[in-house]
Image (spheres, rainbow, N blue to C red):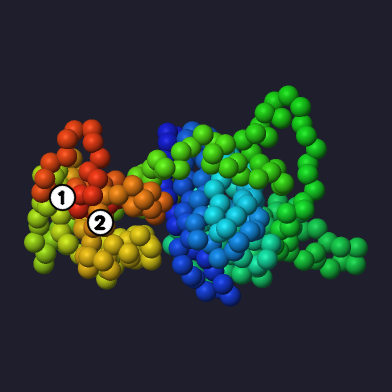
Amino acid sequence: MPMAGMKRFVTYIYAYEEGKKGSNIGFAKIEIRGEDCRVEVHLRGAYVAQAVCEVYLFRVREGRMEGVRIGEIRLVNGKGDGVVVVKAAHLAGTSLGIGDMEGIVLLGGDGQNFLSRWKEGAPFTVDREHFSEWRPEEKAADHTEGGAPQPENMAVSAQKEQPARENGASAQSRRTEPTAGEPLRKREEAGVDMENVQMTELPVRNIFPAYDWQIVWEKLRENRPVFMPFADRTAACVQIELKDIRELPRRYWYLGNNSFLLHGFFNYQYLVIGKTGDARWFLGVPGIYQSQERVMAAIFGFPEFMPAAAGETPSGEEPVNRFGCWYRYMEE
């Protein structure tokens, strides 16, 4: 399945305990560029002090997760960051492509489950008993000496056998496609500055359906006054409440569980949705521009800040201590 151009999206990761969805503990950023698929994972506030998690992209088959392993990530004090590059059309050497996948799941050795699903579909149980690693059809048909089918490979141990190292071009490919024991590289090793994480591009249009935002906008403004409260006088907005997120396309309903959005809403009792002068749609969370707040906003997917109209900020300077809203662009 060849991929043309470059496409990106962000998906939020939640902790699951005894099959029940818990709090948001981070996000993954998927970037498809040409034939390559780059996967970044950033976790904060996981409920484990230390753990090594196997990282899988998965699809759902008959109510079960079927995972393609792409590496592992180490958590220390509930935090972990990593990045890996695999082939978009042949993930980790399998016959499956990124378009076949429905989400990402991290399985810890002590039973921790962290998951995000970016495709809508039938519900399924999030636990080890409902997970198996993808295997080629011919391997899935193997039998033991007694003729009984081999049990499905459940939670994968970190003590997998390492494939033999190849030479030449094969060795070069190992640097972009992880083997069974290869960890995701730390974000620092990938040369990415955590202070400047940017998460503005969201959907992969060839995976998710498109929506007519003009229709969504007209529906939102039917019973709400349009106002322009920001320094950017081309940005037209309406105020919404938390429950009004259900008026957005279904794919954005998960934002109602976003920790940063919830924090802003409970502080100010409203959210903002609108469009800029060049017709780019955005969702905003009210707040005050401060350095620590900027980092948290970016981590939870609201990397841009639009200051309120009152007062002027000199060109090139940050609007420190200014009121406004942290926002993210939606699908156009």
Q: Amino acid at mark 1?
A: Ala
Residue 169, position as x, y percentages in the image: 70, 25
Residue at 45 percent across and 43 percent down: it is 194
In which quadrant of the rendered view does residue 134 lie? bottom right
Of 167 and 13, the residue lying toward us: 13
**Eyeballing the image, is 159 above or below 120?**
above
Residue 238, position as x, y percentages in the image: 15, 59
Q: Left or right: where does residue 51 sit relative to residue 243?
A: right
Residue 42, position as x, y percentages in the image: 50, 51
Instruction: Name the residue carrying label 2.
Output: 287
Q: What numbered label is drawn on residue 134? A: none
What count of labels does the image hold?
2
Instruction: Name the residue carrying label 1.
Output: 308
Considering every residue shown, the one lying at the far right of the view is: 145
Of 57 and 328, the residue lying toward us: 328
Q: Left or right: where does residue 180 sit relative to residue 70?
A: right
Of 124 and 31, the residue lying toward us: 31
**Eyeballing the image, is 21 above or below 290?**
below
In which quadrant of the rendered view does residue 151 lie? bottom right
Residue at 20 percent across and 53 percent down: it is 323
Of 35 and 193, the residue lying toward us: 193
Secondary structure of residue under mark 2 = strand
Secondary structure of residue under mark 1 = loop
Residue at 11 percent across and 45 percent down: it is 311
For label 1, the crowd category at 10 Å Cα-Cα, with few meaning under 14, some 14 to 19 and many 20 or more, is: many
